[in-house]
Image (cartoon, rainbow, N blue to C red):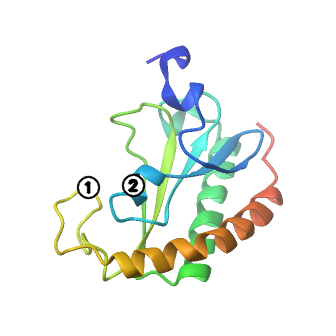
Amino acid sequence: MTASSCPLCTTDGGPLVWRGDKLRVIRADEEAEKGFPAFYRVVWNGHAAEFSDLSPPERQHCMEAVAVVEQALREQLAPTKINLAALGNMVPHLHWHVVARFDWDSHFPAPVWAPAQRARDLQREQAVRARLPALEDLLRARLSNLVPSAS
């Protein structure tokens, strides 16, 4: 896939929470519609297919951003677990999935891509959604203080 045909090069990939020089954070609303309201992606701005395509300082910067998102999710939502994944099988553009998981979610403890284990709890999902504006304000503040390492 080339940058001109890559959906993460030609679009943000979802509602933009924050953008820096090297990376951005988006909310994965298509996953929220499946029952995962606090599903975020840290997306590398330049077209890179693999984590090892980045220089060591870029890798450090990327993982610091992933850690900031994870920590904010933990502080604001108190999930049962945070799932991290960098698959890229469908879109070979470096991005990390950062997903707040709850013991009541329809798939827990299985991965979000596995079959559902139970019915969705729409009331609890909505309660999480209601907390996202404050979470995203915190993310913007913390990510703005994240200084990219020299490449």
Q: Is residue 60 left or right of residue 27?
A: right
Mark nearer the viewer, 2 or 1? 2
Q: Position of residue 102 (x, y in %)?
A: 37, 79
Amino acid type shown at disc 2: Glu
Which mark, by number, is residue 31? Answer: 2
Q: Are marks 2 and 1 in contact (CB under 8 Å)?
A: no
Q: Position of residue 47 (x, y in %)?
A: 57, 27
Q: Position of residue 122 (x, y in %)?
A: 35, 75
Q: Quadrant of the C terminus?
A: top right
Q: Quadrant of residue 82?
A: bottom left
Disc 1 residue crowd, few under 14, some 14–19, many 20+, Cα 10 Å = few
Q: Secondary structure at mark 2?
A: helix
Q: Residue at x 77, y 39 (%)?
A: 21
Q: Considering only vertical position in the picture, is 71 above or below 112?
A: below
Viewer-proximal residue among 60 and 31: 31
Q: Residue at x 34, y 34 (%)?
A: 90
Q: Quadrant of the N terminus?
A: top left
Viewer-proximal residue among 150 and 35: 35
Residue at mark 2 to residue at mark 1: CA–CA distance: 10 Å
Task: Provide the residue designation for mark 1.
Answer: 113
Q: Secondary structure at mark 1?
A: loop
Q: Considering only vertical position in the picture, is 61 above or below 35?
A: above
Q: Position of residue 108 (x, y in %)?
A: 26, 74
Q: Is residue 90 left or right of residue 67?
A: left
Amino acid type shown at disc 1: Trp
Q: Residue at x 65, y 57 (%)?
A: 65
Count of marks overlaid on the render: 2
Q: Is residue 37 left or right of residue 117?
A: right
| Sequence-earlier tag: 2 or 1 | 2
